[in-house]
Amino acid sequence: MAESRESQHSLLPSEEDLVTAKPQRSWNPLGGRSSLSSEYAYLPPASRHESFSEEVFREVGLGITDPSGDALPTRGKRDSISSAGSENTPMTPGFLKTPQGTPAILHSHHSPGNCPTRATVLQSRFSWVPVTIFVLAFYATVFSGIYLAIAIRKPRWNNVSSDGSLAPSTANLLCAFFAKTIELAYVTICVAFLGQVLSRRALTKDSRGISISDMNMRAWIMQPGSMIVHWETLRYSALTFLGAIALVATFVAMLYTTAAEALVSPKLSMGPIVDTTLAGKVYSSFGNVEYLSLNCKSPIPQSMDPYARNDTCLQMVNVGQAYHNYEQWIIKWADFIGSGNDTSNRLQTRPMPTGSMWDNTTITGSWIEMTNLTDLTQKYGRMVNNITMAMPHGGIPAAAMDEKNDIHQPQDVSGEGKYSLEASVPSPAVNVLCVGMNKSELSPLIYSEWPNVHFNATTWSANPPEDIPRTPSWLNRTVVDDIFGFGKKYGQRPPIFGTYPGSNNTILNTTGLSPANAIYLLGKPSVSQPEYVMCAIRAKETGVCSTRYVAASSGAFLSSNCENRTNLLQYSRKQKNFTEGVWQADWKNVAGEWAPSLSLGSGITNAQASNARLLMQMMPTYDNDTKTYSLNPSLPSVGEALAVMAGSTLILSSENAPFVHFFNYTVDNDILTEPVYQYFPASLQEVGYASGGTERWQGVFYVILVFAFLTSFICLIFVIVEARGHQITDFTEPQNLFAIAVNSPQSSQLHGACGGGPVGRQMKERWFIGMDETDAHYYIRAKKDGQSPYTEGRSTGYQGLEPMEVDDGSGSLKAVSPAVDEFRRVSKRSSFLAKLY
């Protein structure tokens, strides 16, 4: 032992150094703040505790005790210690060497005054950390609020498109970028908020203190997986008010970017129906055959066939479109019947008329003004098949694609666009009235039956005989004048046919002189009842419909929406001055080119055309018992078939016609030299890029966006109202917690936790942060440990010493240390929100 003491004393400074040695302290009540110099080291005695004031007045350096219990004198300057030691045995402050040469750790943390704070715990408002936290809190609150508003309002981004000012990929990238910055700012301020609340609670006098599980809440937000790894922390902190906020912040931090992608990022979706006004170009009047002929496209130049070039071209257009539409409708009937289904004798449930346009637009018409065939048969005593069909306005597709209307086409929206347009415009309609007659009833209208005439079947169609009476003659009366509206009473001349057609043949009258507004067809069915059938075909513009156009990348659909009570865009509801039932005389000229092209008049020479044969096989069903006719559930009627074939002429006649029921331009032949725009009311719904979820279940992400804004707002209010811009040292941060922990006395409450960490009830033990006011030394202490380890006779470390006032000889009293004064102010429960700590 003596040898050990000699070796230890050899490390001590000389007598002269011992006299001049000064203890290190952070505050000198007699001389103001002393320098926190690293030049001196102070080792307090382990044998007894002395107050800071006793040390000041004693003016004697304190000794330390070696393992044997002998006191060692106080060390002087570090260089003196170095020179006193062996050159080959470097010394480390805070360690002594045992006789075996092993450093002996001095448990100086059991003694007061060993770690006076070098800086204040309350930071200035304009220092880096408080300003940064405020900026991040403001950013997270404002931008999370903007994202929440966007998700709720679901705005449409018209500038986002493949040819717009912002590409869809760029828009999604920007949305994801800002969402990530919001998430990062949010995590930062939530962790800072928890740290501030827990640190203030730990410092506040008479608070309930903080637990290890409380301090672990910051890890939930930063590392959500820690809730699974260290699940026991949830047991003690999750059900507290602050724990609930931390859990909310955790789930928000995990899912915020996902929620923003689901509800804020622009995605393709069908927008709302918007009432608008659209414009379309008008070139000529409805059913203007001269305009159609002049603009018919053909490789044959006008000079090659100046007489028949235009008519031939128009007839080719008619035959191509009419046969195609008719064939599709016949196939639909065949498929329907072939599948074992039966239609009914009610027109509403029978296949709708179809058509096509531009090879990529499917057209669907509507049956309107429907009548009951059986009722009409009983009324007139003969078969009366009265069919009226409406088709959509043919000019709507071109108007929808016009740049003036600025409608995004499917190819403009990454090839996945779609829009639905409904226009309040008149719809072209065709009426087919077919009446059964016998040979004697028809004779007044058969030219070959007249006396003293010569019938030539070859020249009949091209050059009708001159001896047919002209206006003002109303020609012969018939038994069907009231049905067809013939005679002076109705203002229509009846047709004249050259001869009776043969079985399964049809002949035409397309040269009726004014005021005729229809073309007529006479045919002989293959059945006995009726013997002959005469049909009047005429057209009008109806106001009981609107036109609907749906365009997508896969194709387009043009249809008519007719006689619908809920249709506010029905033309007659928008145009109060519209009169229904005005037949268009000009359309008769279009039909005059259409009917011969379909071989409907070839029966004049009994040519046995296939189209005429098929048509004459579509007679309504005759009931011998009741002597009545009805629609055949498994076969279309002759009136329906003729209407479907004539549907192409309605589209052709309206394609460049006005979007109103009249032509109010005074030009030659009703053809405009330059097209003009007409405006019409419409509703528009289009697929575009918009925020908001695409599926209903994605609405759960609104919870994330709402809580992101609310918790960000709470953090911002805390920074402004409670913290007032100041930040307290966050003792939950690892570096700060480590610094205060290693400079604090050991606690029996963590007995056995030095290796494997705290477990069980140790996680819920309450801790506080106090100060040894004699040395302005912060430490952390368990509440169950009782009084401060640095003072005697005091119940807690929060009380500390009374403010020490010392007379410096000038008659004035010096204040306590600024660090001590700051601790007293911080630990004082003064704000309303502090009650929540």
Image (cartoon, grey):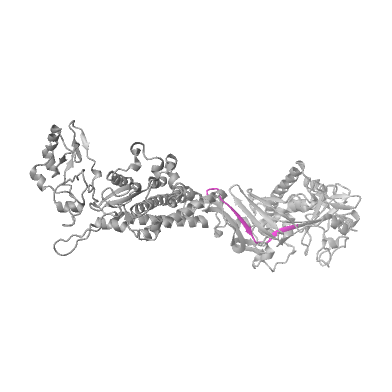
- Residue 734 or 351: which is nearer the viewer? 734
Quarter assignment of residue 141: bottom left
The range drawn in magenta is 413-430
State the image coordinates of residue 518 (x, y, percent, origin top left): 77, 59
Quarter assignment of residue 746: top left
* 765 in magenta: no
* 417 in magenta: yes
- Residue 227 or 477: which is nearer the viewer? 227
The reply to whether residue 454 is visible in this rendering is no
Q: Residue furthest left?
A: 16
State the image coordinates of residue 216 (x, y, percent, origin top left): 39, 45
Q: Is residue 148 left or right of residue 676?
A: left
- Residue 700 or 283: which is nearer the viewer? 700
Q: Is residue 14 left or right of residue 652?
A: left
State the image coordinates of residue 284 (x, y, percent, origin top left): 65, 62
Q: Is residue 70 left or right of residue 174?
A: left
Quarter holding the N terminus is top left
Q: Residue furthest front?
A: 793
Q: Is residue 284 left or right of residue 807?
A: right
The residue located at (12%, 35%) in the rendering is: 6
State the image coordinates of residue 813 (x, y, percent, origin top left): 19, 62
Quarter holding the C terminus is bottom left
Q: Disc count in the image?
A: 0
Q: Residue furthest top?
A: 100
The reply to whether residue 236 is visible in this rendering is yes
